[in-house]
């Protein structure tokens, strides 16, 4: 992208007072492409030169992470997956270690409903860059074969920087977690550079710190079945908002929707939910939890949320019923035209 289209610096309107003027608060905006989505950076109260330098640093990080963490294009993660398939001990790149350790920990917290090791199942469904031929589904026999040896993080041994798998089906795909982890690292960088007010938004999944000028951030949540809004959420000083939905990556066949959020217990797209939004200070946790609670569905989501330490959740089930925790209800305003049933669950 050229600088003319990828970087815009705005200023708020001057507030004129008798005999003097108040300096406008600078607002900086930039965009990058990574992780298959458009990433937006917004900073408040930072001069253009310093903001531009930090933004360039962030873009370089995203490009490196996109390459290193990619599940099917050549990079550090694909090299690791190939090595794990030998079932022999392998050395893990130091840059991958904290990422994989966090993914493994969150998988255990979620009772394996967020499972970062289902890369081969995702590939069977054509969601790893090789879409299935139009009008086809995966071979049920291939899914059945995968289900006979479902990989989990309990199949992985990590000792220092040495990792070993005892399951040949294990292959990391971090699509349900990598954006959140990356966003947390970006927020750490902003704070290390003395920036306390800003937002990083990766395709609608985001973390916002500080304030939007003199106001709190107000974030809209997309309706899962139309182009309008389902709700808006007012954030505090540090808030991550992540949504998993059946409308993001999918194909339809014989009137049935096949989306990319796969249930590792069945080998097929998860049923029961059409969208889950999670709010938490930690973006990596919110990202993984949104996936896990979507898979858990309306019958198990409260249990899994409790295991993961999540208290702000909005789930829309396949009947259109909205389920919310009391803590989520306290910060959420449903759109005026929403007339579907709402259940508050504790």
Image (cartoon, helix red, strand yellow):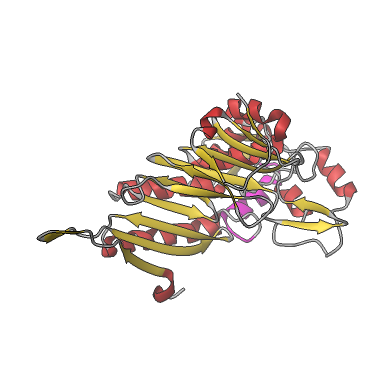
Question: Residue 53 lies in what quarter of the image?
Answer: bottom left
Residue 183: give x, y in percent of width and height: 47, 49
Most extreme residue toward the top is 346
Query: In this picture, is 2 found above or below 254?
Result: below
Residue 149 visible: yes
Question: Residue 19 lies in what quarter of the image?
Answer: bottom left
Residue 267: give x, y in percent of width and height: 79, 43
Q: Is residue 324 left or right of residue 247?
A: left
Most extreme residue toward the left is 19
Question: Residue 340 lies in what quarter of the image?
Answer: top right
Is 300 or 221 nearer to us in this picture? 221
Which residue is pictured at 78% across the width and 52% down the height?
A: 258
Residue 243 is one of the magenta-drawn residues:
no
Query: In this picture, is 315 found above or below 95?
Result: above
Which residue is pictured at 34% across the width and 58% down the height?
A: 54
Q: What is the magenta range? A: 73-89
Q: Is residue 328 left or right of residue 213?
A: right
Residue 81 is one of the magenta-drawn residues:
yes
Number of numbered discs overlaid on the protein picture: 0
Which residue is pictured at 52% across the width and 39% down the height?
A: 332
Which residue is pictured at 70% across the width and 42% down the height?
A: 87
Residue 286: give x, y in percent of width and height: 54, 39
Is 74 or 219 nearer to us in this picture? 219
| Quarter occupied by the C terminus | top right
Query: In this picture, is 134 found above or below 166?
Result: below
Residue 95 visible: no
């Amino acid at each position: 992208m050229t600088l003319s289209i990828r970087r815009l610096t705005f200023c708020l309107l001057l507030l004129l007072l008798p005999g003097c003027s108040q300096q406008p608060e600078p607002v900086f905006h930039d965009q990058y492409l990574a992780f298959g989505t458009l990433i937006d950076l917004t900073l408040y109260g930072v001069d253009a030169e310093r903001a531009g330098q930090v933004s360039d640093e962030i873009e370089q990080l995203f490009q490196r992470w996109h390459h290193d963490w990619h599940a099917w294009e050549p990079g550090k993660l694909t090299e690791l997956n190939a090595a794990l398939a030998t079932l022999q001990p392998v050395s893990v790149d130091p840059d991958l270690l904290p990422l994989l350790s966090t993914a493994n920990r969150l998988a255990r917290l979620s009772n394996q409903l967020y499972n970062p090791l289902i890369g081969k199942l995702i590939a069977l469904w054509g969601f790893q860059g090789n879409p299935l031929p139009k009008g086809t589904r995966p071979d049920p026999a291939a899914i059945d074969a995968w289900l006979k040896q479902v990989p989990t993080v309990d199949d992985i041994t990590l000792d220092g920087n040495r990792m070993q798998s005892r399951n040949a089906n294990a292959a990391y795909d971090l699509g349900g977690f990598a954006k959140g982890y990356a966003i947390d690292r970006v927020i750490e960088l902003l704070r290390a550079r003395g920036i306390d007010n800003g937002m990083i938004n990766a395709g609608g999944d985001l973390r916002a710190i500080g304030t939007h000028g003199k106001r709190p951030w107000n974030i809209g949540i997309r309706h899962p079945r139309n182009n309008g809004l389902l709700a808006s959420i007012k954030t505090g000083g540090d808030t991550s908002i992540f949504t998993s939905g059946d409308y993001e990556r999918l194909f339809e066949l014989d009137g049935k929707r096949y989306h990319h959020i796969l249930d590792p217990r069945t080998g097929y797209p998860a049923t029961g939910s059409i969208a889950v939004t999670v709010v938490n200070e930690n973006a990596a946790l919110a990202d993984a939890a949104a996936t896990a609670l979507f898979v858990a569905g309306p019958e198990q989501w409260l249990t899994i949320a409790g295991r993961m330490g999540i208290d702000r959740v909005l789930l829309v089930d396949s009947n259109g019923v909205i389920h919310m925790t009391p803590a989520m209800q306290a910060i959420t305003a449903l759109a005026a035209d929403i007339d579907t049933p709402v259940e508050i669950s504790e």
